[in-house]
């Protein structure tokens, strides 16, 4: 498991009973988590006095039962700064476990010894975009939601990267990649965090287990002749990390060499000393980069 354990402004204090107790900077949040199925005692006093709690509804969905926090505030991770904004559906605009992948991408870029261009697909609020730009890469940030792309711009500005070489694109990811291939544009690294389920601009259904393979076949065509890394993230329940390895080895390693490694992502839990699983990631690295990682 790759554990994001270098945070200072975020802490997973405890978890259990389908919820997690988190510190986001100066504020304590309680949010649902489907992985935290254990019924451990809630001895930590912060369980009883969070600043905000998101409660699930018995009929589906949910709402903030308590929300004594600002509309937004900032948290830092190393040299990066992000805007946190609790949204209607439990999310805050940041997945802190992804810091393990930010570290990976930043290290790869800084070690490359050459200019690196990164394509970030389903890029959300730009955690990976900001990380790669901070490491010196040029980045193309693509997401179909205009609000998320605007939020990504805010995160770049908060991190002092408003003038960094970042292209901000509001578009369907597949249609954008098809156009980039026709234009002859290529990228040295790809990061993608596709949804488990969604609908395209014309109402077409995206289902990860049905669409990931053909989408990966498409995206492989936008890689440069000397790609550096390819990172896939998945929050789809039941999708084993080894599935990501199989896809990357079949489509990327077979053409470029290198090596793939896939693991669960996790967050360190202060109260128990254990780790909460938070999805899975697959990382393909070019031959030289893979050797340095081993």
Image: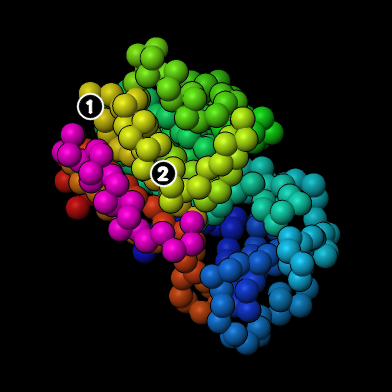
Q: Secondary structure at mark 2?
A: helix
Q: Which colour scheme appears in the figure?
A: rainbow
Whether residue 276 can be seen here:
yes
Task: Decide: is 48 above or below 32.
Answer: below
Q: Is residue 246 a member of the stretch shown in magenta?
A: yes
User: Based on the displayed image, in which of its 4 quarters is residue 9 positioned?
Assistant: bottom right
Which residue appears at 50% of the width and 30% of the height? 173
Between discs 2 and 1, the one toward the N terminus: 2
Bin the neighbour count of mark 2 within 10 Å (Cα to Cα): few under 14, some 14-19, many 20 and up: some
Task: Decide: is 278 above or below 141.
Answer: below
User: Based on the displayed image, in which of its 4 quarters is residue 254 positioned?
Assistant: top left
Residue 109 position, x and y percent, is 33, 34
Q: Which residue is mark 2?
A: 212
Q: Secondary structure at mark 1?
A: loop
Residue 56 position, x and y percent, is 74, 67
Bin the neighbour count of mark 1 within 10 Å (Cα to Cα): few under 14, some 14-19, many 20 and up: few
18 relative position to 185: left or right: right
Q: Nearer the viewer, mark 2 or mark 1?
A: 2
The label shown at residue 226 is: 1
Quadrant holding the N terminus: bottom left
Residue 65 position, x and y percent, is 82, 65
C-alpha span from label 2 to label 1? 23 Å
Q: Is residue 68 a member of the stretch shown in magenta?
A: no
Asked if the residue under mark 1 is in contact with the one under mark 2, i.e. CB atoms within 8 Å, the reply is: no
Which residue appears at 56% of the width and 41% of the height? 205
Name the one closer to the observer, 194 or 112. 194
What's the magenta bit mostly, secondary-structure-wise? Answer: helix
Q: Which residues are magenta?
A: 236-257
């Amino acid at each position: 498991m790759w554990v994001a354990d270098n945070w200072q402004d975020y802490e997973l204090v405890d978890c259990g009973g389908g919820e997690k107790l988190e510190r986001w900077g100066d504020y304590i949040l309680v949010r649902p988590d489907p992985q935290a199925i254990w019924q451990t005692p809630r001895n930590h006093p912060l369980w009883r006095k969070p600043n905000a709690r998101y409660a699930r509804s018995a009929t589906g969905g949910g709402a903030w039962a308590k929300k004594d926090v600002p509309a937004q505030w900032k948290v830092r991770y190393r040299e990066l700064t992000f805007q946190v904004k609790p949204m209607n559906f439990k999310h805050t605009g940041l997945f802190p476990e992804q810091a393990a992948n930010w570290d990976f991408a930043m290290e790869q870029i800084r070690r490359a010894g050459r200019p690196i261009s990164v394509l970030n697909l389903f890029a959300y609020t730009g955690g990976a975009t900001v990380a790669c730009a901070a490491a010196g890469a040029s980045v193309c940030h693509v997401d179909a939601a205009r609000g998320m792309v605007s939020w990504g711009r805010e995160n770049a500005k908060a991190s002092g990267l408003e003038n960094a070489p970042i292209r901000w694109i509001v578009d369907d990811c597949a249609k954008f990649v098809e156009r980039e291939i026709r234009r002859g544009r290529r990228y040295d690294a790809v990061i993608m965090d596709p949804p488990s389920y969604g609908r395209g601009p014309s109402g077409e259904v995206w289902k990860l287990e049905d669409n990931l393979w053909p989408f990966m076949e498409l995206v492989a065509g936008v890689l440069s002749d000397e790609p550096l890394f390819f990172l896939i993230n998945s929050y789809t329940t039941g999708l084993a990390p080894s599935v990501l390895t199989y896809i990357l080895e079949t489509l990327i390693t077979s053409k470029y060499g290198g090596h793939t490694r896939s693991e669960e992502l996790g967050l360190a839990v202060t109260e128990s000393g254990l780790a909460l699983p938070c999805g899975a990631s697959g990382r393909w690295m070019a031959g030289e980069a893979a050797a340095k990682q081993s």
